[in-house]
Structures are given as C-alpha cells and as structure tokens.
Amino acid sequence: SQQGEEDPQALSIQEGENATMNCSYKTSINNLQWYRQNSGRGLVHLILIRSNEREKHSGRLRVTLDTSKKSSSLLITASRAADTASYFCATDRDTGRRALTFGSGTRLQVQP
Amino acid sequence: GAGVSQSPSNKVTEKGKDVELRCDPISGHTALYWYRQSLGQGLEFLIYFQGNSAPDKSGLPSDRFSAERTGGSVSTLTIQRTQQEDSAVYLCASRALNEQFFGPGTRLTVL
C-alpha cells in the first residue's frame, strides 16, 4: 500500500519559474527521499532528508520536512525544460526490510 | 561503476504464459528489492533480499509471483500464468546505506 499522497498530481509551469511539490505520509519515518522518473522508467535519487532535519538544499533543489505534520515539500528553482518528469517522495521507516513507501507522484511539465 | 541493470527492457506475453525478469544489482550491495509500478502510479513493494537471510515476500500480490537471488547477486522475478493485471513496469533496486539505486525497469505487457 502507498503511504504518501502528493499534490499536485500534475503541474505545468514556464521555464524559469519555481515548482513546488508536496508530500504527506502517515507513519513515523527515519528519512524521506525524493526521486525523479523520466518516461515511466528508472528512478533517479535526488535528495534525502533525515527525520531530525528540517531543510536541505542541493543545487536548485530545496526540501523541507515537517515531522509534526508528516509532510515534506520539494522546491525546484529556476526550472528548465529538462526538469520535466514525474517526482516521487518515498519514506524509509528504518525498520526491518527498509523498503521505501512511495507516494503517487507529481507530473511536472516545464514549458520552454 | 555500473549501475543496476535489468533485462529484458520490454516483454510482451500472452495471458497464461510464464515470464522471468532479471536484475543485476550493483556489486557489493547486499540488499535487493523488487517493486512494481502500474501506469501512472507510485511504486509498490514486492520482495526484499538481504544477504543470506530468508527473503521478505510480504509484498507479493499472489502465489503466482516468486523470486530468487542466486549467490547473493543476480535476482530473477518469475510470474506464472500471467494475467492482464500483471501488466506494469517492474523495477529492481539495490541499496547501500540509505540510498536505493534503481534499474531502468522491465515493462511487462500481458495481452
């Protein structure tokens, strides 16, 4: 079963604009990760934020985590056409098998 | 170094036939996962291998699904008597520390 819900389901913006995607989850976590998927195939790991962190940056990516609200956001600044993809949040409970639980994803379209 | 590889990249089969999907994880990664992604959806956990321990099969949707991992490396996911609802992209991942590295997936279409 999927733990996360993401919104929006789809987002269309112009190149240069910022894109914000949100993710909510249900259980306690060890960390939360964001992945990008192009053309419905392999996933690329973007960034990991631990449960004791509130914000993290990587290049044009900014991730926030609010464990009290069980939510996270991914901000892509100065978007490019190449950012067009589906973005998924995934939670890691750091117990047992540590399989990631994925949200349903946000489809981002960046218009050139 | 090489990433996770999967084969075949695409597989079209007829309902009722068996299929085998292969995953080559990153060398040295002891944890290996299979996930399934239906069209427009997130990933669904299927099965997990860790070293020589018994696999965690709790995500397998039915007894038609099975997987093995030989020698702690290559893994094969087998689906017997395929059904149309088995159509999906099957993704394999291996893990080092906290990060899972995904293969390109196998797109399975059951006609």
Image (tube, coloured by chain):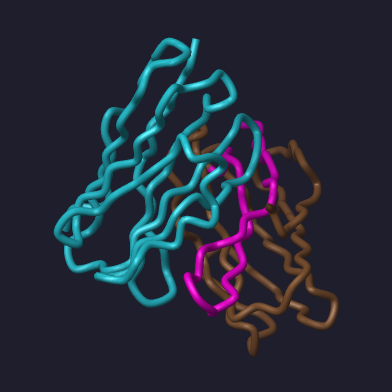
Task: Reply yes or no: does residue A24 show up in magenta.
Answer: no
Q: Position of residue A52 (x, y in %)?
A: 64, 90
Q: Position of residue A63 (x, y in %)?
A: 65, 70
Chain B representation colour: cyan
Task: Reply yes or no: does residue A108 show up in magenta.
Answer: yes
Please determine whether, in this image, residue A97 is positioned above or below residue B18. below
Can you tell which quarter of the image residue B70 is in? bottom left
At x 35%, y 62%, the residue is B49
Please determine whether, in this image, residue A94 is positioned above or below residue B4. below
Q: Where is residue B43 in the image (x, y as percent from the top left)?
A: 57, 47
- Quadrant showing the C terminus of chain A: top right
Please determine whether, in this image, residue A16 is positioned above or below residue B10. below
Which of B43 and B14 lies nearest the eye of the viewer? B14
Residue extending farthest right: A69
Residue extending farthest front: B63
- Tally of numbered discs: 0
At x 68%, y 62%, the residue is A74
Which of A24 and A65 lies nearest the eye of the viewer? A24
Can you tell which quarter of the image residue B9 is in? top left
At x 14%, y 59%, the residue is B71
> Left or right: B30 with respect to A88?
left
Residue extending farthest bottom: A52
Q: Position of residue A7 (x, y in %)?
A: 80, 50
> Left or right: B95 with respect to B16?
left
Which of A1 and B97 lies nearest the eye of the viewer? A1
At x 65%, y 78%, the residue is A29
Chain A representation colour: brown
Q: What stretch is highlighted in magenta?
A: A83-112
Please determine whether, in this image, residue B100 is positioned above or below residue B93. below
